[in-house]
Amino acid sequence: MDNEREHILFALSRALQEFTSASTSSRLIPEVGTNIGYAISNAASIEDVAAVPGRIRRAFGRAIYCLPPAFGASDHIARVILTAMKYDPKVRSAMNVKIVDPATIGAYVFDRSLEPTRSASKEGRTMNFMVESAYRSTGSVPRFIVDLGAFGKEPGTFILGEDPESVVKDAIKLTEMV
């Protein structure tokens, strides 16, 4: 298990470097920041998903981050990945970016107004519901999910894939569309 975790951190670091080195990557970073995560096979909890502590931010026209990837660093992106893995265990990586026109990328569109009324026990489960809704509607875990946002919630696009390298490649392609 330790070897797999080391591999996860190495692959995520390499993909993170590729993303932040791309001259146009900062165009994809939403106000809330971007994160990318990668889960071990058979991940069961947030502690099994590595991500960027504090997220990737935009500063001076560049994409930057302060700390290296770590396990348990992001509840948000981990929930997306863990839910996707329930439906397709090969989908172990995800990244959130600025909203991209869903028609141009063939994305599943998630409307938060369709989410059941929230209660204290369901707070923070939007990411789970989003991936579950996408799967129920399409019969598979889509490569792109566009979240239309809501009052106080920034819209965005989620890129899902088997590994962070493929996710970052898709992200860099999206920079031409933003």
Image (cartoon, helix red, strand yellow):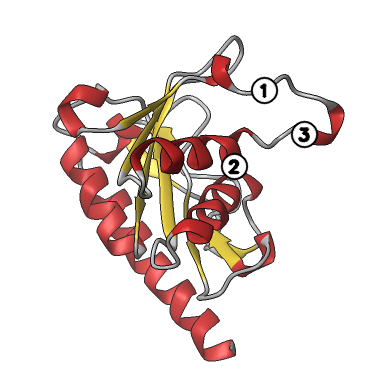
**Foreground residue, 54 or 112?**
112
- Toward the viewer: 79 or 96? 79
Per the image, label 2 sits on a secondary structure element best described as helix
- Separation of disc 2 and disc 3 at Cα? 10 Å
What amino acid is found at the position of numbered circle 1 in the picture? Pro
Q: CA distance from mark 3 to mark 1?
A: 9 Å
Instruction: Tell me which amino acid carries mark 2.
Output: Asn
Q: Is residue 44 left or right of residue 88?
A: right
Figure quadrant of residue 5: bottom right
Q: Position of residue 148 (x, y in %)?
A: 44, 19
Front residue of 59/71: it is 71
Circles 3 and 1 in contact, beta carbons < 8 Å: yes
Outermost residue toward the top in this view? 151
What x and y, as percent, mark residue 169?
Answer: 21, 53
How packed is label 2: few (under 14 Cα within 10 Å), some, or many (20 or more)? some
* First reached walking from the N terminus: tag 3 or tag 1: 1
Q: Nearer the viewer, mark 3 or mark 1?
A: 1
- 127 relative position to 98: left or right: right
Which residue position is annotated with label 1? 116
- Tell me if 118 is positioned left or right of 24 in this view: right
User: Which residue is labeled 2 in the image?
Assistant: 128
Give the vertical position of 133 relative to 155 (above or below). below
Mark 3: give few (<14), some (14-19) or many (20+) Cα within 10 Å. few
